[in-house]
Amino acid sequence: MLRIDRAIYDRIVAHARRDHPDEACGVVAGPEGSDRPERFIEMINAERSPTFYRFDSLEQLKVWREMDDRGEEPVVIYHSHTATEAYPSRTDISYASEPNAHYVLVSTREADTVEFRSYRIVDGQVTEEPVEVTGAGDE
Amino acid sequence: MAIEVRIPTILRNLTGDAKVVEGNGSTLGELFTDLDNRYPGIGERLVDDGKLRRFVNVYLNDEDVRFVGGLEAALSDGDSVTVLPAVAGGSL
């Protein structure tokens, strides 16, 4: 199960909406081994594409080093699908490379419905998990 | 000539869980061959058909090696190499 604070949940959804129709992507870091997504980091989609995303390699190095220095790991890796459902595609599955991360997918295909789902992707196996949104957030 | 290499989580099963290992080589390609001798199997996770795998990012100090010669990139003593899996995907 993914437990995530309302304020971070809202920022992920807002980023996905803002970059629509291109895919948006990013990370939520948290203390290593804690499974707590705490630090929201919006990433550049180097592909700037409605059907593909890839972290910019130099930005990724900078962010991964920062996490390393702070004793953090990527607890959530998120991206959006802009015309299809929030379910990992074949490409998502084949490139998934952080076995400890929650892979969050947001679909922005409907302007007024939020589709926010979370998965574990390990060795090509996808397992959906419940999402619990905690706290009151900014509202 | 010792080069420090940072290994991502997903490849640590090949390095006995080590996060940082050392290897030798005067080019990145030689370094990866040396690493594969020490940690069998790691070479094919980094190199495919004589080229860097497309969805693996390799950095020489602060540079993406794709911009500094790829597997031909020259290494010097004390250099640091970081391997990170690219984070990528898409809806297709």
Image (cartoon, coloured by chain):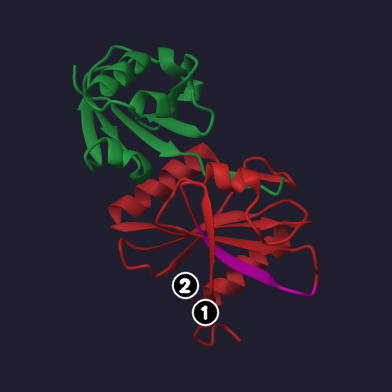
Chain colours: A red, B green
Q: Is B50 situated left or right of B31 in this image?
A: right
For label 1, the crowd category at 10 Å Cα-Cα, with few meaning under 14, some 14 to 19 and many 20 or more, is: few
Q: Amino acid at mark 1?
A: Glu
Q: Residue at x 42, y 45 (%)?
A: A62
Q: Is B18 situated left or right of A48 in this image?
A: left
Disc 2 target residue: A1
Q: Are marks 2 and 1 on the same chain?
A: yes
Magenta-tinted stretch: A112-120
Mark 2 or 1: in front is 2
Q: Amino acid at mark 2?
A: Met
Residue A55 shows in this picture: no
User: Considering depth in this image, is A53 or A125 the residue closer to the camera?
Assistant: A125
Residue A132 badge: 1
Q: Secondary structure at mark 2?
A: loop
For label 2, the crowd category at 10 Å Cα-Cα, with few meaning under 14, some 14 to 19 and many 20 or more, is: few
Q: Residue at x 25, y 28 (%)?
A: B39
